[in-house]
Image (tube, rainbow, N blue to C red):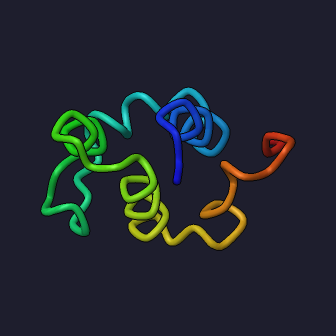
Amino acid sequence: MVKHSEFQQAMRDWFGPYASSLAQDMVLAPLGSKTADEALAEGVPPGRVWEAICTVNELGDEARWHHRRAQPRKS
């Protein structure tokens, strides 16, 4: 289970200053063509939203399990 705070942190860690824009604007086909913000507002679990973001952006296992790491990714 991914907490909302873990989802937000993972977005910031992987997408930096673009995280907020991506959450608002990137349409996620695995979530019925909703954005991350729309899906979260509708009650989709943050873990499912993060999985969709990883899939759409072709991010590997390091990203998929990022929220369980002790240290944030270094840019």
The answer to whether residue 67 is left or right of residue 18 is right
What residue is drawn where x is 26% and y is 58%? 28
Please state the horizontal and vertical placement of residue 65, each as a whole percent of the image: 66, 61
Vertical placement of residue 51 versus 7, above or below? below
Q: Position of residue 13 (x, y in %)?
A: 67, 38
Name the one closer to the observer, 4 or 75: 4
Q: Position of residue 55 (x, y in %)?
A: 43, 70
Residue shown at the point (53%, 48%) measured from the top left:
2
Tell me what residue is drawn at x 26 percent, y 49 percent: 44
User: Total of numbered circles in the picture?
Assistant: 0
> Is residue 15 rendered to the left or right of residue 36?
right
Q: Could you say where residue 48 lies in the image, as x and y percent from the top left? A: 38, 59
Residue 5, picture quadrant: top right
Q: Which of 15/40 is in front?
A: 40
Q: Is residue 24 positioned above or below 64 on the image?
A: above
Question: Could you tell me which quadrant the C terminus lies in?
Answer: top right
Q: Is residue 50 left or right of residue 64?
A: left
